[in-house]
Image (tube, rainbow, N blue to C red):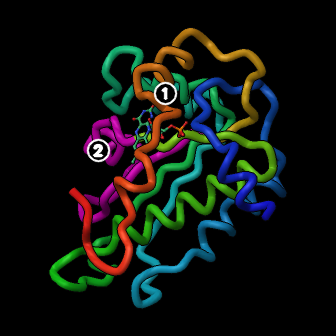
Amino acid sequence: MELYDKILDRESVRDFDDKAIEAEKLEIILEAGRLAPSAQNKQCWRYVVLKDKDNIKRFAKNIGFLGTVNFFIAKAPVVIVACADPKRSAKLNGQDYYLVDTAISFQQMMLAAWSMGIGSCWLAAFNENKVRQYLGIPANIRVVGMSPFGYPKEKKSLYGKAVKAFAGSKNRLERSKIVSEERWFLD
Ligand SMILES: Cc1cc2nc3c(=O)[nH]c(=O)nc-3n(C[C@H](O)[C@H](O)[C@H](O)COP(=O)(O)O)c2cc1C
């Protein structure tokens, strides 16, 4: 149940230590994403990895964050931008599966990272066009999300604590609200 233990104690990390991520650990993180399942095994995800400190800082300044929101990524040793090519994903029941495929792959990276003591935080609040422009991503590719990766700082910043409180990060719906047995009994 090692994986379940990691699922239990995982949390979004918004404060990072200066310590770099070891190359072999970054390899493992990227492999965990590459090996993910996807609809019809189409593997529509594509990733851009930022490791250069100055580039990460410039990136954070240029992708349309509102005020200080999400600016904490500027202090992470690695940022990974999760993209997808919708044309290379499956369409089933009228649904595009690129978001599902890419979310699974990216979450595998995050869980692999967490299992090695490396924190991350899904981010969706950015300006997609600005990200595209900054990184040179073509218009047909969607930017699904991004995350900083790094060792968690021992002491959380005021910002980190405030976002956690604001997002109610520990709150989860009760099981009876989200799971029913044998047929749909949910609201
Ligand atoms: C798709 C997605 C988008 C998110 N976007 C942001 C974001 O832009 N900024 C942020 O600080 N956290 C963001 N989060 C993190 C959530 O706030 C966090 O997962 C939630 O509060 C639960 O907290 P936990 O991850 O610590 O358990 C996002 C999470 C997901 C899954």
Q: Is residue 92 magenta?
A: no
Check the picture and name the quadrant holding the N terminus. Answer: bottom right
Q: Relative to 186, is 145 on the left or the right? A: right
- Does 174 appear above or below 18? below
Q: Amino acid at mark 1?
A: Arg
Instruction: Give the CA separation, mark 1 to mark 2.
Output: 16 Å
Q: Nearer the viewer, mark 1 or mark 2?
A: 2
Mark 2 Cα shell of 10 Å, populated few (<14), some (14-19), many (≥20): some
Q: Relative to 30, is 147 on the left or the right? A: left
Q: Residue at x 29, y 72 (%)?
A: 86
Whether the residue carrying mark 2 lies under 8 Å from ligand 1 is answered with no
Residue 186 figure quarter: bottom left
Foreground pick, 140 / 84: 84
Check the picture and name the quadrant holding the C terminus. Answer: bottom left
Which residue corresponds to mark 1?
A: 58
Foreground pick, 48 / 105: 105
Q: Amino acid at mark 2?
A: Glu
The image shows residue 98 at horizontal and vertical percentages of 34, 71
Whether the residue carrying mark 1 lies under 8 Å from ligand 1 is answered with no
Q: Check residue 128 in the rendering and tell me which mark sits there, or answer none.
A: 2
Tell me the magenta residue range.
Answer: 124-148
Q: Earlier in the sequence, mark 1 or mark 2?
A: 1
Q: Residue at x 60, y 28 (%)?
A: 54
